[in-house]
Amino acid sequence: MRVVTVVGARPQFIKAAMVSRALRSKPGMEEIIVHTGQHYDDNMSDVFFRDLDMPKPDYNLGVGSASHGAQTGRMLEGIERVLLETKPDCVVVYGDTNSTLAGALAAVKMQLRAAHVEAGLRSYNRRMPEEINRIVADHVSDVLFAPTQTAVDNLISEGIPTDRVFLCGDVMYDAVLHYAEVFEARSSLLRDLGVERKGFILATVHRAENTDDPPRLAAIIGGLREATTLWPVVFPIHPRTRASMRDHGLTTEEGNGLIITEPVGYGDMLVLEKNARLIATDSGGVQKEAFFFRVPCVTLRDETEWVELVREGWNHLVPPLSAHAVHHGIAMSLETHGDETDPYGEGDAAERIVRVLGEGPQTDAQLG
């Protein structure tokens, strides 16, 4: 069986690494990796393949940055060309990026089986490009791998047939279990940054709703600077965030407890997450990784797809309406701990996914 895997952004590399490992261990399975080039510089792309010991992509479309329509269109054209050449049995897409949307559309338009990993997430905010991407991908895909029961319920409520939906757990949990100790043993990042274990706040910001909205971005940066009165703040800065800060006159200089770094690889990011006292982020993946390490999280958004984490007390929504609101949300969340819960499976999601891909839905319906 030939499977084409479509990836393009950091979280997808992590998820695909676990599924790829499982695919390549199964006799009769062949994988072809297509990198759209959505994340294209070394810090956001190549370093992840190296860190994850993941095979280099068989195809790199080199799409790069563009408007949503232009970027998705170029991806769709490039992926279609690869599918015509490779003639796969199945196309696997991940998450909620433009790469996800393009991969799913290219597959179904060629009447190929499309599988969506991390299906069923909903923020119910259609202003988010990610929300549109995930809804469309879910409704055109043939096989939907849901990470949680909430995601399953969302899909069923939207009328998707139950025989297309599989509760498999979260492949990012697989990845944390597989990689965390290995990376911590060989990382010198905490020493290099001059911070102690459980002695700093970790912050990440990359979503367009924050980076492209000057008042929200100013509130986040101001709030993080205020939070340095509590603990040092380590801020690996996304290229989009750095560019937007520069464009809107927000300084990217560190100092007074704010430690700004370039983006870090997956391994170093796990080390930062595991050892942070609190994480402030607008990333869906980082929210979950915070929970995996049982680190309190402040989500700098108006809503989150990972409602289980809010419900269980591990995640606190803090809309970045002012610097004071961001600082206050961080301060109030520092000492909180949520309930002991395990909504993301047992760390075997990739194996479950590959079993369904290889043997067909009728063999393992619902994977409960």
Image (tube, helix red, strand yellow):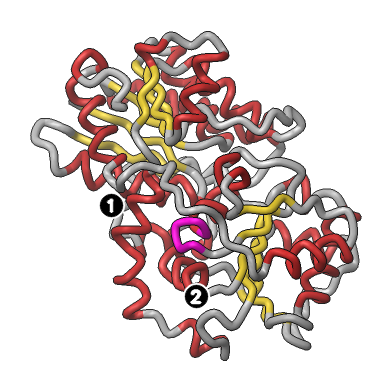
Tell me the element at label 2: helix
First in sequence: mark 2 vs mark 1: 1
Q: Quadrant of residue 71?
A: top right
Circle on res. 103 = none
Label 1 Cα neighbours within 10 Å, binned few <14 / some 14-19 / many ≥20: some
- In the drawing, does residue 114 fall left or right of residue 333? left
Q: Is residue 254 above or below residue 240?
A: below
Q: Is residue 327 visible?
A: yes
Label 2 Cα neighbours within 10 Å, binned few <14 / some 14-19 / many ≥20: many
Q: Looking at the image, which residue is at 57% across and 62% down?
A: 337
Q: Is residue 45 above or below residue 75?
A: below
Label 2 vs label 1, nearer the camera: 2
- In the drawing, does residue 146 fall left or right of residue 339? left
Residue behind mark 1: 55
Q: Is residue 236 visible?
A: no
Q: Quadrant of the N terminus?
A: top left
Residue behind mark 2: 275
Tell me the element at label 1: loop
Q: Is residue 291 magenta?
A: yes
